[in-house]
Amino acid sequence: MPYRNSPSGQDGLATYVYYTYVPLDHPDKMVRSVTLPDADTIDKGRIHIFDIAIKYAAPKSGADLKTRITQLAEEGAIHEQAVYALNVHLTAVNQFEKKNDSEKVVKHLQGFHHLLDYYGENGRLTDAAYRVLKADTDYLIRKWQL
């Protein structure tokens, strides 16, 4: 059970822990500000921020894209049908990555782009999920084209 510290020890007041995840959809983007709730409307003016972390984790492989898809699906940002199709496509990408076949990796990642477009246009991905996956895919394409 969460609690608050006070000068005299643990505070017995009800304590709520809030967490949010805000993905940066491109490694070159920068966070300029973070807007916090108005402290006067929360708990009689008391609010404690104990950590803010902002990080873009660029994917290293198709497996990282699969992990990102799982995370987004758990958040409800990707329809189950799209999760399956996207993961199947990334399985092929992974096979070509293992063979270090950059031409086929890029070709299949470009096909993955088309799948993202299809599912985005048909409401199977939220706009945020679409942008994140598109940026991650672009990053991997650039990486393999070098």
Image (cartoon, rainbow, N blue to C red):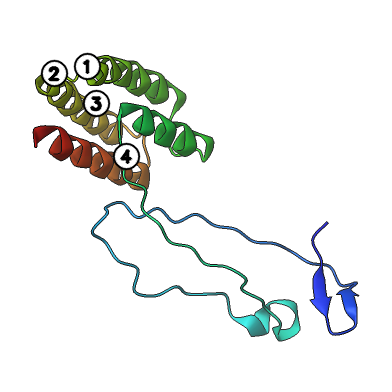
- Disc 4 target residue: 59
**Label 3 vs label 1: CA separation?**
18 Å
Circle 2 — which element? helix
Q: Quadrant of the C terminus?
A: top left
Q: Which mark is residue 115?
A: 3
Q: Is residue 44 visible?
A: yes
Q: Which mark is residue 104?
A: 2
Circle 3 — which element? helix
Q: Give the side of residue 14 with respect to residue 104, left or right.
A: right
Q: Is residue 78 visible?
A: no
- Image coordinates for residue 96, horizontal then vertical, percent: 22, 16
**Is residue 55 or residue 43 the one in the foreground?**
55
Q: Are marks 1 and 4 in contact (CB under 8 Å)?
A: no
Note whether 107 is above or below 139 in the view shown.
above
Q: Quadrant of the N terminus?
A: bottom right
Q: Amino acid at mark 1?
A: Phe
**Label 3 vs label 4: CA separation?**
18 Å
- Disc 1 target residue: 96
Q: What's the residue at 61%, 73% (across, down)?
A: 49
Sequence order check, earlier mark of 1 and 4:
4
Q: Amino acid at mark 3?
A: Leu
